[in-house]
């Protein structure tokens, strides 16, 4: 007896109202989205980066002012807010850097372009960038 052919899966566009809640993005998709987001964060915080660099290297007086912003704050913004902005900048740089290294590795090693290696390298990228952010964030907030 001939078995009936199995119905092939139907791939369609995602409906934002019905499908988005149950849709599970693979780790490589998360790394890709976060790579773009980290690039946008670094671009938007570029004036803050330039201010931090200029203020920290101009003179001893400007460096003291730089430190006071992170300790006491400026105006209505407390110092912890500036530390959180710096932490977002640290995360965005580290994630963008590790995801860029992942992309370079995939370009160099053509063996690394498979579903399983993409999944493991994406998880490694996420874990490494978060671990480095935790270490530098602990230093930023004075835990060591």
Image (tube, rainbow, N blue to C red):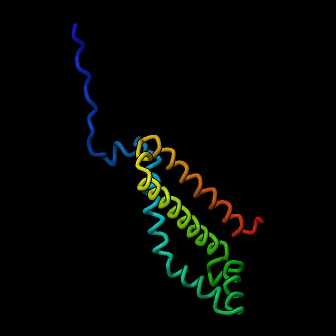
129 versus 47 height, above or below: above
52 versus 131 height, above or below: below
Percent position (x, y) of residue 35?
46, 60
Q: Quadrant of residue 69?
A: bottom right
**Residue sitting nearer the eye, 107 or 127:** 107
Task: Please tell me which residue is depicted at 67% across the width and 65% down the height of the picture.
Answer: 136
**Residue sitting nearer the eye, 124 or 35:** 124
Which quadrant would the N terminus be assigned to in this image? Answer: top left
Task: Please tell me which residue is depicted at 27% across the width and 39% down the height of the picture.
Answer: 11
- Relative side of 50 to 19, left or right: right
Which quadrant would the C terminus be assigned to in this image? Answer: bottom right
Number of marks present in the image shown: 0
Task: Please tell me which residue is depicted at 24% across the width and 13% down the height of the picture.
Answer: 3
- Relative side of 126 to 69, left or right: left
**Residue sitting nearer the eye, 100 or 17:** 100
Percent position (x, y) of residue 29?
42, 50
> Which residue is outermost to the right?
144
**Residue sitting nearer the eye, 43 or 94:** 94
Percent position (x, y) of residue 124?
55, 50
Q: Quadrant of residue 8?
A: top left
Percent position (x, y) of residue 34?
47, 58
71 versus 124 height, above or below: below
Task: Please tell me which residue is depicted at 33% across the width and 49% down the height of the picture.
Answer: 16
- Relative side of 56 to 96, left or right: right
């Amino acid at each position: 007896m001939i078995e009936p052919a199995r119905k092939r899966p139907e791939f369609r566009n995602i409906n934002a109202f019905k499908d988005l809640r149950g849709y599970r993005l693979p780790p490589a998709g998360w790394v890709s989205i976060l790579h773009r987001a980290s690039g946008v964060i670094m671009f938007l915080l570029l004036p803050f980066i330039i201010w931090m660099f200029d203020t920290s290297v101009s003179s001893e007086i400007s460096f003291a002012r730089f430190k006071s912003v992170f300790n006491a704050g400026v105006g209505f913004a407390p110092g912890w807010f500036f530390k959180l902005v710096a932490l977002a900048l640290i995360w965005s740089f580290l994630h963008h850097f590790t995801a860029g290294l992942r992309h370079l590795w995939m370009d160099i090693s053509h063996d690394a372009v498979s579903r399983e290696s993409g999944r493991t390298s994406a998880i490694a990228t996420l874990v490494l960038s978060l671990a480095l952010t935790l270490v530098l964030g602990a230093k930023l907030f004075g835990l060591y």
